[in-house]
Image: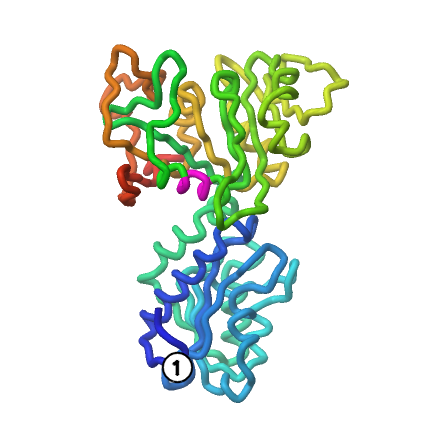
Amino acid sequence: MAKIGAIITIDEAMQLALAEAKKGAGFTSPNPLVGAVVLDKNNKLLSVDYHKNYGGPHAEVNALNKLNDRQLEGAKIIVTLEPCAHEGKTPSCAKKLATLPISTVIYAVEDPNPLVAGKGLEILKESGKEVIHLSHYENEAIELAEIFFTNQKLKRPFVSLKVASSLDGYIGLQSGESQWITGEKARNYGHFLRATHDAICVGAKTFIVDNPKLNIRHNDFPNKKNKVIVLDSEGNLSDKIKSSNLIKYHSLEDILIIHPEKIKNKPEQDLKLIPVKYSQGFDVEDLLDKLFEKNIFSLLIEGGAKTYQLFLESKKFDRLFCFIAPSLIGQKNGLSWTKDLVTRSLSEKLSFDKLKAIPLDPDILLTMKTSDNH
């Protein structure tokens, strides 16, 4: 990382802002991850910062608060996302920038929020600031804030599938044994994913067989609490949940039970029950609509095979995190995470793009976006 006082290029400044933004992961929901860098008129690095938490100052304000007007004379601010125009939990960043003696605002991508979308740029242009779109960083900036972009454009939660499997695609044995296929580094990264999603979702069989805690056990998030969603297709898990590990590690208000609309649960139950359309399986679109209404903006699917199938076949998911261990289990006793997925012809196969490989010795994480979701 460049040191304060170093002379850097605009490209280097944007790369620095993108890297800085990632420090907010797990703390900004429902806001996006955003980073900002301030250079003086000679491209000397003055300040670097990011959006640290929802309700707190935005990245631009955090970066600017370290500087005085004399330092800002003729300065440039480089930001990963268009400065906001509207007043919400915090004042408008665009209006603040318009009053400062900076000369130039450089951004990577326009805000998808219809309350903002280009309006922040107009405020800046009208105030006489030079506004530059660094378009070759647009895709990277969208990926950085992919949860926010999905929320704004599709009006549903961002959905990630998390799978830990052997080389031959098995997530455990048919007996139910599944701990542990991957090593400590992979499991630690899995807890990072829990911390950076609003809720974790599992199916009924995974809940019954594993009795999981589904909490966050990561040093960077010692106090982070998350919501847990259990898909209860039979509508009979409420009593089991009350004596499970979920109750030990989560408050009642953070446990959501999804059940078919046609099943009437007992009204005296104090767990949160959410009825969802059901026909040979939960209606994923209705499920996501109900969760979005409850301010769940990102969802991590952790199994099992039937739950993976539900989201794979509906194509209502956005990213796959596949942790692969250097081991083989074999078809005879192995449980495949795609065992219920039906592909009738190769033209129907699920396709992915933007593949990245992250080594997590001894395992490897493959992360990718689905290329045909809706």
Q: Where the N terminus falls, by quadrant? A: bottom left
Q: Nearer the viewer, residue 252 or 68?
A: 252
Highlighted magenta segment, given as a residue range: 188-193
Does residue 78 appear in the picture of this structure?
A: yes
Identify residue for label 1.
5
Q: Is 199 located above or below residue 113 in the figure?
A: above
Give coordinates of residue 40: x percent, y percent: 42, 83
Q: In which quarter of the image is residue 69?
A: bottom right
Give coordinates of residue 42: x percent, y percent: 37, 86
> Which secondary structure is most common in the magenta stretch?
helix
Q: Which of 125 and 74 is in front in this view?
A: 74
Relative horizontal placement of residue 98, taking residue 301 as reference (left or right): right
Does residue 374 appear in the picture of this structure?
A: no
Give coordinates of residue 53: x percent, y percent: 57, 56
Residue at the bottom extreme of this rendering: 70
Q: Residue at x 49, y 63 (%)?
A: 50
Relative horizontal placement of residue 175, taking residue 124 as reference (left or right): left
Find out whether residue 192 is within the magenta segment: yes
Amino acid carrying label 1: it is Gly
Q: Which residue is drawn at 62% across and 33% down?
A: 250
Find out whether residue 325 is within the magenta segment: no
Q: Which of 264 and 82 is in front in this view?
A: 264
